[in-house]
Amino acid sequence: MKLAFIGSHGVGKTTLCYELAARLKRQDRTVELVMEVARRCPLPINRDTTLPAQAWILHTQVAAELAASAEAEIVICDRAVLDNYAYLIHQAGRQPAYDALVSAWLASYDALIKVPIVAPPQFDGRRDISVEFQHAIDATIDDLLVEFGATVAALDPARRGRWVDDTLTALGLPLHPPQTDLFGAEPGPADLP
């Protein structure tokens, strides 16, 4: 199974990747993470990006997903080719060759989980903090989802504390390891202080 958390920057995708991976590992599943490749890009990103930079990001994303899929039962991606493509479109417009790549590669995901904007982006050394840019990328992602006919599970902004549970439910996976039924329920986020 390969799933991707998609959405604009600064919405919590990376945190969700780690939280979901930890929950799945407690269920004795093999998990690989494909972390956001844009952070490793040697070329400009964000609003200063270029077509070569975005090409590097798209191709590196595909390569990382291929490598991870060979190693694990479940692959969790911090972004998909679709939301990476939204940044390319924002800077350089639509590119027919990349339309074809993104459209074809979308079929490789078993699930896309859309993470909504709940707060403005915070500066972390790489992330752009413009709220307008964050929302423009989010809108482009939504447009691309419709245009490519992609099936997506959208997380509810009002349920932020339950997003991992909601993701597991959307994937048809158990919320806790089956063996915990033998010893009592595992504490969930609502049970923690």
Image: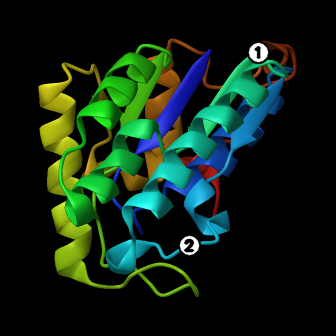
| Front disc: 2 or 1 | 2
Q: Is residue 167 above or below residue 88?
A: above
Label 2, label 1: how far apart the Cα atoms are: 32 Å
> Which residue lies under the disc numbered 2?
43
Q: Quadrant of residue 182?
A: top right
- Does 16 sit left or right of 104 as displayed? right
Q: Is residue 30 above or below residue 96?
A: above
- Does 133 sit left or right of 20 as displayed? left
- Does 135 sit left or right of 48 as displayed? left
Q: Which residue: 37% across, 80% down? A: 48
Residue 88 visible to the viewer: yes
Label for residue 73? 1
The residue type indicated by label 2 comes to: Leu
Q: SS of the residue at dot 1?
A: loop
Q: Which residue: 56% across, 72% down? A: 43
- Mark nearer the N terminus (2 vs 1): 2
Query: Do the CB atoms of the residues marked 2 and 1 lie less than 8 Å apart?
Result: no
The quadrant in which the C terminus is found is bottom right
The quadrant in which the N terminus is found is top right
Q: SS of the residue at dot 2?
A: loop
The residue type indicated by label 1 comes to: Glu
Q: Which residue: 32% across, 22% down? A: 103
Q: Position of residue 84 (x, y in %)?
A: 41, 49
Q: Is residue 19 above or below residue 97?
A: below
Q: Position of residue 7 (x, y in %)?
A: 35, 51
Question: How many marks can you see?
Answer: 2
Q: Quadrant of residue 143?
A: top left
Q: Position of residue 146 (x, y in %)?
A: 13, 29
Q: Position of residue 4 (x, y in %)?
A: 50, 34
Circle 2 crowding by C-alpha within 10 Å: few under 14, some 14–19, many from 20: some
- Does 88 sit left or right of 163 as displayed? left
